[in-house]
Image (tube, rainbow, N blue to C red):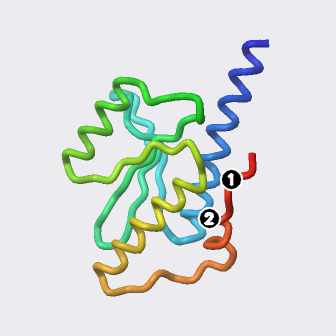
Amino acid sequence: MQLRSLKEQFKKEQRIEDAVVDWAKVTGIPVFKLKLDTNSGWPDRMFLLPNGRACFIEFKRPEKNPRKLQEYRATTLKQLGYNVYTAIDKFAAIRWLETLYAISLSETGNKIPSVTGLRGAVSRPRTG
């Protein structure tokens, strides 16, 4: 029973990550899974934004907090000037990325491209 519960919890985290990654790909934001064998604790994904910016997201189930090493890595990245976010909700993570994306585009003088259906989905309240 406990193994099934752990699998279900992992699926929740994976669904959040998948939704954010899908949004980024449709929006045209390159996204990479970080799998660093020698150094654990780094965020799950790196997103490359316009104007030479990168940001990072650590995906967590709503009932979980980042481990101490993950907090340390996030602090290190922030001290280097990167944006880092811990996502427990796909809508909040997408809003965070939208904001950073808009800032990056405005710095280059570009406008946010229209992506049909996505902006409305972000503004809806979470329903379980």
Q: Residues within 10 Å of mark 2 (few under 14, many from 20)?
A: some
Secondary structure, mark 2, is helix
Residue 122 disc label: 2
List the single residue furthest toward the left.
Answer: 80
Whether residue 69 sits left or right of residue 8 in the image: it is left
Residue 25 disc label: none
Location of residue 108 in the rendering, given as x and y in whole percent from the top left corner: 30, 82
Mark 2: amino acid: Val
Callout in the foreground (2, 1): 1
Q: Quadrant of residue 106?
A: bottom left
Location of residue 33 in the rendering, given as x and y in whole percent from the top left corner: 48, 46
Report the front residue among 107 and 24: 107
Q: Quadrant of residue 7?
A: top right
The structure residue drawn at horizontal position 48% and vertical position 57%, both measured from the top left corner, is 31
The structure residue drawn at horizontal position 67% and vertical position 67%, both measured from the top left corner, is 121
Q: Which residue is mark 1?
A: 126
